[in-house]
Amino acid sequence: MLISYREALNQAMREEMRRDDRVFLIGEEVGYYQGAFKVSKGFVEEFGTQRVLDTPITEAGFTGLAIGAAMAGLHPIVELMTFNFGILALDQIVNNAAKIRYMSGGQLSVPLVIRGPGSAAHQLGAQHSQSLEAWFCHVPGLKVIAPATPHDAKGLLKSAVRDSNPVIFIEAQLLYSTKGDVAEGEYTIPIGQAEVKRRGDDVTIVAYSKMLLLALEAAEDLAREGIQAEVVDPRTLKPLDVQAIVSSVQKTGRLVIVEEGWRFAGLGAQIAEVVYAQAFDYLDAPIVRVTGVDVPMPYTRPLEDAAIPDRERVRAAVRQVVKGS
Amino acid sequence: MDRDDLLSLYRQMLLIRRFEEKSAEMYALAKIGGFLHLYIGEEAIAVGAIAAIRANDYVITAYRDHGHCLAKGSEPGRVMAELFGKATGLCKGKGGSMHLVDARRNFMGGYAIVGGHLPLATGLAFAVKYQKRDQVVLCFFGEGAVPTGQAHEAFNLAALWKLPVIFICENNRYGMGTPVQRAVALYSNVAETARAYGIEAETVDGMDVLAVRTLMKTVVTKVRSAPHPSFVEALTYRFMGHSMADPSHGHYRSKEEVEEERTRDPLLLLRQTIMNRGLGSEPDFKRLEREVGEIVAAAVKFADESPFPAPTALEEDVYAE
Ligand SMILES: Cc1ncc(C[n+]2csc(CCOP(=O)(O)OP(=O)(O)O)c2C)c(N)n1
Ligand SMILES: [Mg+2]
């Protein structure tokens, strides 16, 4: 079944809301407007306004409300219009959602999904274009998922809804209309499992979310140059499937990590650290990271393009680790 | 109101008072670490309010939480053990003084980010309404939380969605060293803040446990019968410093002021009422002192003799299975 990423998310939530009436959707414009990116199309009609809640523009308030509802046994899905606005809810996410289980010595849990788009779209300016996954990955108690394909988005969102922990589920505006094959019928994908999206022996490229598509395109280009790249998509960023990445590097001996977020203290630095610790002897060249540039996102298109990894930068990085130039 | 009823309220307040005094002692002996915020002087609010609800109603509060936890019925030994950081503590020693939780009693916790638990309270109330149950949520907080954005977001959502939460502002006139008139725009009538959201609000003498309970009974009955938020401002005073790191008076308030307020000690007021009505006398209070003293001593003994958590506990309880 060929469907869009948007439709995959819609199906996942719809199936989970049909399955379990403790699940409800809450966020700005999720109801009558059908979601700022139309992910919740048809939800008010099917589930009513008791389970599809349009909120005022109060991210801390409604995220905190969802956390409280989760503590009392419900399974909320919070839609953030974008993760940029999730910054206003960081106190709730970091100090409450992530810690309540631990602080209570395991008495309380917070089964909650917080989802919405992260990363840059086109020319939305600095406050609407940023990749903050590293912030969330840093916090014990959270799980973080960033799927790239419709199939993964659907299977992982269903798993996230069924999980007993707070799960940060990061989508991307530029992925919503992309299409892909989705398995027929009911399925879930386990949280914490990477997938090799392309086989190759010469170099491993680790990339997630939008950057996976870029890595796959670059890999095709490189194949024409005689370089076979293996592309690994962690899909879940926390807990990270270290084993899958390490196994691939043990085979290829080379690693390029592609991420859209800022370079300094970015997620790729963490991935590099685990690979150096666990597969140092297998490496034939230093790990190379392709990242966003450490600047607030500029508006103007040429500078914006320069701030985000592109196909050519991925190819150049791969050539560097493979040929040393 | 009969004798047993009043003596029981007195006993609960006395338990909190003696528990807190003992905590201060244990802090001085370094049995308790970190921040320790005592509820001494404010006992009538938690005891009066919680006396007006059912056992399965929710309570959530800020970091000055020992009193609420004890009033909700938690075992003093397990509370003291939590302060000691012991494995037998309510939260296995992982929460500490500011983060007591007793889920079995729907005591949903103490939270240490000022204003941060008010949205949680609206969420508990949302779950109650969503599942068509008839519980109410009591959400306690200091007047220092009133100007926070999170409080206002919570007031707005609770009013908008008619959630069964009762916001109880413990106005002890100070947030650390900052008097309310330097922190809250509507300082002379904090309850007015809630009315701006269409939330019914009342102000009560928070030193008078009977007044608190009477008002709360009315409010709870109303909220339970038709879900909606309510706001109660309880006027009180903290007799001790903000935490153990702060003397009971300092640069920000005078010794005379503290002494003056201590004449309205909630325990003293109830004791006078009981005596004036001829419902109790010296021997009754002596007996309660002895009983409570024994409970607190046993709590300390339990905490002291309990083991610290095993090192393996460190990484447990981060994630649920
Ligand atoms: C958001 C936030 N800012 C600052 C602090 C530090 N702090 C802890 S308690 C406190 C005063 C709070 O006063 P109030 O809400 O009136 O409660 P009280 O201590 O009087 O019970 C402050 C500033 C905090 N815990 N959270
Ligand atoms: Mg105060």
Image: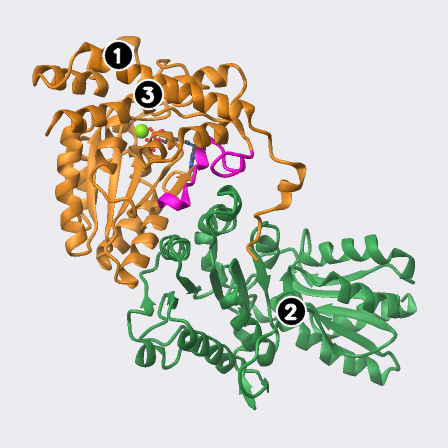
Chain colours: A green, B orange
Above/below status of B177 relative to A108: above
Q: Which of marks 1 and 3 is nearer the N terminus?
A: 3
Binning the other alpha carbons within 10 Å of mark 2 as few (below 14), some (14 to 19) or many (20 upward) gives: many
* Magenta stretch, residue numbers: B87-107
Q: Name the residue under label 3.
A: B17
Give the mark toward the camera: 1 or 2: 1
Q: Residue B299: percent from the left, percent from the top? A: 44, 24
- Determine the chain carrying the residue at label 3: B
**Circles 1 and 2: CB distance less than 8 Å?**
no
- Say which mark, if any, is on residue B286: 1
Could you tell me how far apart the alpha carbons at marks 1 and 3 are, in whole angstroms?
Answer: 15 Å
As shown in the figure, which amino acid type bears the numbered disc 2? Arg
Please state the chain letter of the residue tagged with numbered disc 2 in the rendered image.
Answer: A
Q: How far apart are marks 3 and 2 (CA)?
A: 53 Å
On what subunit does the disc labeled 1 rest? B
Q: Which residue lies under the disc numbered 2?
A: A235
